[in-house]
Amino acid sequence: MSLYDRIPNNVNLSGDVRLQRALEKWLPNYLDWWREMGPDGFQEKDIYLRTAISVEPNGWAHFDYIKMPDYRWGIFLVPADPDARIGFGDNYGKPAYQEVPGEFRNSLRRIIVTQGDTEPASVEQQRQLGHTCPSLYDLRNLFQVNVEEGRHLWAMVYLLHGFFGRDGREEAEELLQRRSGNPDKPRILQAFNQPCDDWLNFYCFTMFTDRDGKYQLSALAESGFEPLARTCQFMLTEEAHHMFVGETGIGRVVKRTAQLMKETDDVRKLGGIPLEIIQKYINFWYTYSLDLFGGEISSNSADFFAAGLKGRFQEQKKYTDHIAAEGFVNIESVEDGKVISRPIALRNALNEVLRDEYVKDSERALARWNKFIAEEGVNAELYLPSPRFHRHVGEFANHDFDIHGSLISREEFERRSVEWLPSIEDREYVQSLMISVTEPGKIANWIAPPATGVNNKSFDFEYVRL
Ligand SMILES: [Fe+2]
Ligand SMILES: [Fe+2]
């Protein structure tokens, strides 16, 4: 582990002068991007952050005060397995690829660029949130997520520079050129062009959109292209915290709302966020995140699985048949104004198989939040919308459904969408609550404090020195 090199790494960068030079050329451009598009207004503050210093499961992180531009962004891969094998597909059991297999060069580059693009995009989406934090604890978590998304960009840029030659270097440059929400040079995926300008959006984003990342990274973490697998495995370690921030963040808002509901019929009067608004935010981010898995029926997913490049969630742990050449999955689509279901060959339905895992995971979180409501003695429940609702990719795109998944007309959808998706008034109301609370130990009234602090510190620890 070369921790104190200009680019901290455990890939023996100094042994590959060409690659080292290329990355050292990219580094100042990255820092320019960070200063321009990273968290606004807090670059010179000391923040209690964790930094990756090892890839060992125990003791991989070091916590201390640091200014964000001094964060040690680096390239960390889990150790290579000299006997690594391709774990699925047509080449099952053959030695893993150490170089990019020629025929999949373009699609693999596309996968890495698409994943890489999401990392800086989310930093851009969240860059103003620091000004309205509900507590110092939350402010610190926001910045932790931001610097780690920056590191994930490094992880993908390492692969582009290291394995894709000149076009990889060009792609790495473009990752710093696109901007979230910019009509001329937007980020690649739509969920990453949506504004994330209040903290309820932020928790929903880290809950639902980062969670798509978990499933994509998990599928790539068992890739037969070993450098990609090893990179994604370590990214997942960091990613777990982002989803924790999202899941517990929404949970704390829900809990606070339930507490306020015991005191009043309209939590607005006490400065809380009504459950209906929380539900609409869930509907919005959950459905945009479902789109990120791609079409239900996909020949790309079949080709990638066949090649041993992208597997299923927990491919080794959960499955015994790693060839998946047989079997069918029932996939719904719309035909003649009706939803029908038909069997699709398993390999062509792998996006849907991965999405199913995500849906189950999201349902688990919903059940937890509903428990918080029940614990306060309030009779109400949150739910997940039908996966047909509000979709822009796949079989249900270009059709309109109500929240339960019944086909409706475009007109009806437009008329009723304010029942299901945040209206301008809803967003303005949430926005009106976003007043920064920065005294250690204090918290905004619309959210409950966390159960514990960071790294065994208490909630009233000074997580950010302002
Ligand atoms: Fe990430
Ligand atoms: Fe993340």
Image (tube, grey):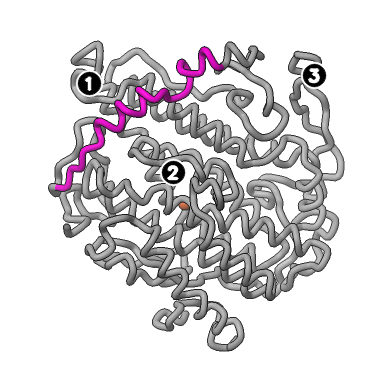
Q: Nearer the viewer, residue 445 or 22?
A: 22
Whole-angstrom CA distance, mark 3 to mark 2, is 35 Å
Judge: label 2 CB < 8 Å from ligand 2. Answer: yes
Q: Residue at x 46, y 69 (%)?
A: 30
Ligand 2 within 8 angstroms of badge 1 C-beta: no
Observer able to see residue 275: yes
Image vertical order of residue 51 relative to residue 290, above or below:
below
Residue at horizontal 57 percent and vertical 41 percent from the top: 190
Front: mark 3 or 2: 3
Residue tagged 1: 260
Residue bounds of the magenta highlight: 414-438
Quadrant of res 88: bottom right
The label shown at residue 335 is 3
Give the x, y percent position of residue 23. 53, 77
Q: Secondary structure at mark 1?
A: helix
Inspect the image, locate mark 1, and give the three-letter code of the amino acid beneath it: Leu
- Where does residue 302 sit, x and y in percent of width and height? 80, 47
Indicate whether 378 appears above or below 239.
above
